[in-house]
Amino acid sequence: MPDQSTRQYIVSQDAVRRGFLLGGIGMVAVILALLILITSRPQGQLQALDDGQHQALLAEAEARLSGFELLDDGAARIDIEHAMRLVVERGVEFSIAAPTAAVPDAPGAMVAEVDGAAIYTAQCAACHQAGGAGIPSAFPPLAGHVGDLYAADPAYLVDVLLYGLQGQITVAGVSYNGLMPAFGQLGDPEIAAVLNHVLTAWGDADELGDAFVPFTPDDVAEQRGLGLTASDVLQARGELDLD
């Protein structure tokens, strides 16, 4: 019987099946990648807004910012009393860089004196004005009034700066109903210095005569930590003997 030759294949059937399987997986991966590229949106790109969308966003922002009013020119306006309330509710960081002057304290020794006028200009003049006249019906005057407060109770002036003042008051026949923020973040020497400035700058201390004794940091330290509120200070004002 003649020998029958055995057929031999370069690639086995198993290898062919594996090839088809891997090829199918590759095609599926390519199709998925193409689908992702087609359906995805570019990220991080700015999209232009038409005027209607722009106005809608502005209106939404205005609604969220209670107390603000958007003006026709694009500027914003806020009620002054609401602004002062925001100062108290959210807090304001003040940076004091008051000039100091070296004055004699004892023979051979020098100490730094806090400049109360510089603190007043930086922190108080915007409302009470440079000359202490205030703004009628908005912010009360200090000139001609702070001396009366000192005569009634010097500690009350310290409390106003440490804890603020909120509610209706009357000064020289004019009613004021606003809020003064607390300045307790100032140090004891700074508060004493600015109080001495407002008492001496416009002649109130001269009217007090010998009754006026300049504030010291110790006077402020005695009142600090009492835990008063701006409403407590208003109530204390009502108990003062003011004309």
Image: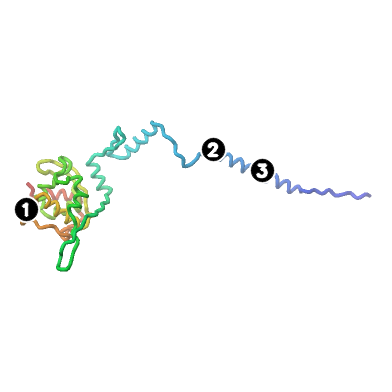
Would you identify the image quadrant in which residue 67 lies?
Answer: top left
Instruction: Name the residue rendered at 35%, 36% in the picture.
Output: 60
Q: CA distance from mark 3 to mark 2?
A: 23 Å
- Mark nearer the N terminus (3 vs 2): 3
Residue occupying the point 30% across, 33% down: 73
The image position of residue 177, as x and y in percent, is 17, 42
Which residue is at 57% across, 39% downward?
35
Indicate the amino acid at tag 2: Thr
Q: What kind of residue is marked 1?
A: Leu
Contact (CB < 8 A) between labels 3 and 1? no
Q: Earlier in the sequence, mark 3 or mark 1?
A: 3
Q: Nearer the viewer, mark 3 or mark 1?
A: 1
Marking on residue 208: 1
Q: Residues within 10 Å of mark 3 (few under 14, many from 20)?
A: few
Q: How far apart, in angstroms, are the residues tagged by discs 3 and 1?
A: 100 Å
Which three-letter amino acid code belongs to the residue tagged 3? Answer: Gly
Closer to us: mark 1 or mark 2? 1
Pick the front one: 81 or 231: 81
Hey, which residue is sitting farthest right in the picture? 1
Of residues 114 and 179, which is closer to you in this image? 114
Q: Percent position (x, y) of residue 120?
A: 19, 50
Residue that numbered label 3 is attached to = 24
